[in-house]
Amino acid sequence: MTSKPWLTISLVIIAMGGLAMSAPASAINNIVGQYFEQAEKVGEGRMTYLFWDVYDARLYAPQGKWQEDGPYVLELHYLRSLDGEAIAERSVEEIRKQGFDDNAILSDWLEQMRNIFPDVNKGVTLVGIADQNQHTHFYRNDELIGSVPDPEFTRRFFGIWLSENTSEPSLRKKLLGVS
C-alpha cells in the first residue's frame, strides 16, 4: 500500500474539482464563522497520485496565518470517488507513520472516523475544522457530519497534511504558503 494521504481522506479534512472549483470563501466563512472569524486562505495545492488527480486542498486560518494550535480549516474538494472506510483506515496508517503508536487510542479514533467519514464522489467537499479548543469538526459540503473533541486527535489528524513528517511535503509547503 502507498504512503499517500489521499486514501486517508480519499479526508478529511477532510470532499472538493480544479483549484478554481473549490467552495467559495463565503461558503467556508459561513461554516467557519461558528468557530472563529475572518478565515483567509493560507495556501492551496492539488494531491496527485501517479497520474490521477485526487483532490484539491485549501488551508484557511484567521487572517491567513496558520498556527498548529489553531484554529484553522482544511478543505478537500474531491476529484475522484473514494470509500469512507478506506479514508478512515488510511488516516490511521498516516498517523502511525508520524510516530504515534498507541493501539488502543488509534483503534478508538479509527472507529470514530469510520462513523464520520462518508463515501465521497467526485465534486464532494469535506471540511475539517480545528477549533480554538483543538476539537475537530467535519463537514460534508456545508453539513456537519461529526466531531472528535480530542486535542491529540486534532494534532495527529491534521498532521497528515501539516506535520513536518507528512508523506506529502510538497503539498504541505503549498498549503502553508511556503512554496
Image (cartoon, helix red, strand yellow):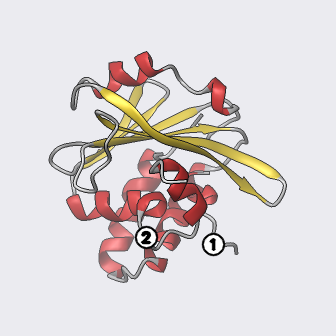
Question: Who's the residue at 23% across and 49% down the image?
Answer: 135
Task: Classify residue 68 as left or right of residue 60.
Answer: left
Instruction: Report the front residue among 43 and 8.
Output: 43
Question: Who's the residue at 62% across and 39% down the image?
Answer: 120
Instruction: Report the front residue among 170 and 10.
Output: 170
Q: Earlier in the sequence, mark 2 or mark 1?
A: 1
Q: CA distance from mark 2 to mark 1?
A: 15 Å
Query: Would residue 59 be seen by someone viewing this image from the given angle?
Result: yes
Q: How would you rate the neighbour count of disc 1 (Cα within 10 Å): few for under 14, some for 14-19, many for 20 or more?
A: some
Q: Position of residue 151 (x, y in %)?
A: 21, 59
Q: Residue flagged by tag 2: what amino acid is it?
A: Glu
Q: Regarding mark 1 in the picture, which secondary structure is present there? A: loop
Q: How would you rate the neighbour count of disc 2 (Cα within 10 Å): few for under 14, some for 14-19, many for 20 or more?
A: few
Query: Would residue 11 be seen by someone viewing this image from the given angle?
Result: no
Q: Position of residue 175 (x, y in %)?
A: 49, 49
Q: Which mark is residue 3?
A: 1
Q: Which mark is residue 164?
A: 2
Q: Regarding mark 2 in the picture, which secondary structure is present there? A: loop
Residue reaching furthest to the right? 51
Task: Classify residue 32 as left or right of residue 158.
Answer: left
Q: Position of residue 20 (x, y in %)?
A: 65, 26
Quarter holding the N terminus? bottom right
Give the answer, above or below, for where 103 lies relative to 154.
Answer: below
Q: Position of residue 68 (x, y in %)?
A: 28, 56
Q: Which mark is residue 63?
A: none
Question: Who's the residue at 37% across and 55% down the image?
Answer: 112
Task: Classify residue 93 as left or right of residue 124.
Answer: left
Give the answer, above or below, for where 63 lies relative to 110.
Answer: above
Give the answer, above or below, for where 150 lies relative to 118.
Answer: below
